[in-house]
Amino acid sequence: RDCLLSRGLGDVYKRQVSVEVTVSGGKITAIDVVNAANEDAAYLDKAKGIIDSMISANSPEVDTISGATFSSTGIKTAVQQALEGAAA
């Protein structure tokens, strides 16, 4: 497939983060947080820094963001779930 959009959900310490992941040409080209209702805005903003790292690495297997560990873990988990769903 040339372009694939998949959704994933990360649930860490009663915080849920939903993402949409776009894959094109076998590479992650975009990750969008579409819902993070229970997240603290300041932590979520800091945690979103993990998105560029995952796109650059073409993988969710990157370090979490210090000072926003739970929020960035939620994003990582959601991206991993989305990628696993896309591969199925």
Image: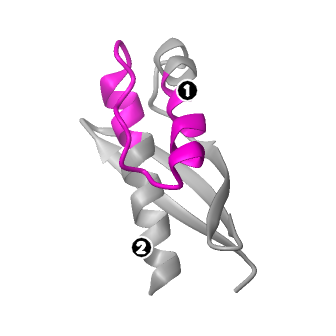
Q: Residue at x 40, y 46 (%)?
A: 76
Quick check: can you spot residue 77?
A: yes
Residue 85: percent from left, percent from top: 46, 76
Q: Is residue 62 above or below residue 79?
A: above
Quadrant housing residue 14: top left
Q: Residue at x 46, y 17 (%)?
A: 43
Give, as a three-letter code, the residue at label 1. Answer: Gly
The tag earlier along the polypeptide, 2 or 1, is 1
Magenta-tinted stretch: 47-74
29 lies left or right of 18: right
Q: Quadrant of the N terminus?
A: bottom right
Quadrant housing residue 68: top left
Q: Quadrant of the C terminus?
A: bottom left
Looking at the image, the residue that sits furthest to the left is 13
Q: Is residue 59 above or below residue 51?
A: below
Residue highlighted by disc 1: 49
Residue 50: percent from left, percent from top: 50, 33
What is the distance, in whole Å, between disc 2 and disc 1 at their CAs?
A: 22 Å
Q: Residue at x 52, y 78 (%)?
A: 86
Residue 77: percent from left, percent from top: 36, 51
The residue lying toward the viewer, choosing from 14 and 67, is: 67
The residue lying toward the viewer, choosing from 23 and 38, is: 23
Residue 56 in the magenta stretch? The answer is yes
The residue lying toward the viewer, choosing from 59 and 70, is: 59
Q: Residue at x 45, y 42 (%)?
A: 75
Q: Is residue 73 above or below residue 44?
A: below
Report helix, strand or loop for mark 2: helix
Residue highlighted by disc 2: 84
Tally the numbered discs. 2
